[in-house]
Amino acid sequence: MTSNQVLPCPLCQTQIPFDTHLLLQGQKFSCPNVNCDAVVGIEPNSVPVAEEAMKKFEDLKQEMNNKK
Amino acid sequence: MSEENKTSLAKSFTGLPMDGLIGGPLIAAAKANSLMAIEQVKFLLKYCFSKEDNEEGYHPVMINMSLTRSYLSGSNSEGEPNLEKVTTTFSLPLLTMIPINHLGVNSVEIDFDMEVKAQHQIDSASNSSLIGQRALKGKRKSKPKGFDPSSQKHGYNEVQLVGTVSYDTKEKQTKDSNDHYEKSNSARLSVSVKAGPLPLPVGVNAIIDVFSKSIHPVEVPKTESTDKTDDES
């Protein structure tokens, strides 16, 4: 994974590392806690909202790099 | 040579205040950091938060996430346990998904040699002033020594150095004796700026932490009134 994004497991609050791009493509991520078998993913109805925000974020980063 | 070029050349030999040489790059780095922070805040408020016209304050944009768990339920005809999956939906702020890095300048190194052209000491009499409505019989009270935060100026005994950026050829000759350099008016000012991810602001971390903790379901204790309502239904 290129980024170090984490989100807390809804069951045991363990930090689940994930990649935003892979998450938006439909991949699910498992909780690293051996005693927890939770698997999290994004709902299809929320993908457009998240994709638009990520695209705008990437555009902002590109704009900041160009300004350097 | 134009008059403007003659003037600029003359000015280059008169020297620059030392605080400008050192403070200039640092101020530029601080401005760059503030610009990046402002752009990040604009992005967050535009895409990660929403605001209704008739409401005050912002609300986070929420996305739906799915949580899948497996559990064993009974057994089949062969006596083997049945493994079933259950999917639950929960909401999460979009802010937690965006890989926000507080990108900023975390190191500025300024390296230059300075040749002092002049040294000024501000006269104490020029800094004195009347304090309050009462003039002390024509006597003037002088401002206190040291830095005055209200006026952002130093009291008397302020020393100001004026110099130019210079290049020490003698130092270079001692290191590389085989090389030959001619003394010139060349100057060297090296500014190294290193940018990298800085820790997220405390406020952003607090928002993420609060909404992350709200994911975990909390059991609401039953009260007497709810028990009665349940019994009546």
Image (cartoon, coloured by chain):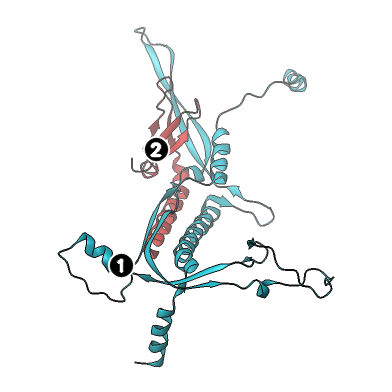
Q: Colour of chain B?
A: cyan
Tell me the chain of label 1.
B
Is B229 situated above or below B128? above
How many other residues sit within 10 Å of disc 2, few (<14), some (14-19) or many (≥20)?
Answer: many
Residue B136 is situated, as x and y percent measured from the top left of the image, at 83, 71
Residue lying at the far bottom in this picture: please name it.
Answer: B2
Residue B154 is situated, as x and y percent measured from the top left of the image, at 62, 65
Tell me the chain of label 2.
A
Q: Between residues B44 and B120, which one lies in front from this camera angle? A: B120
Disc assigned to residue B168 = 1
Residue B149 is situated, as x and y percent measured from the top left of the image, at 65, 61
Q: Colour of chain A?
A: red
Q: Residue at x 58, y 52 (%)?
A: B50
Q: Nearer the viewer, mark 1 or mark 2?
A: 1
Is B134 situated above or below A59? below
Residue lying at the far top in this picture: please name it.
Answer: B79
Location of the C terminus of chain B by quadrant is top right
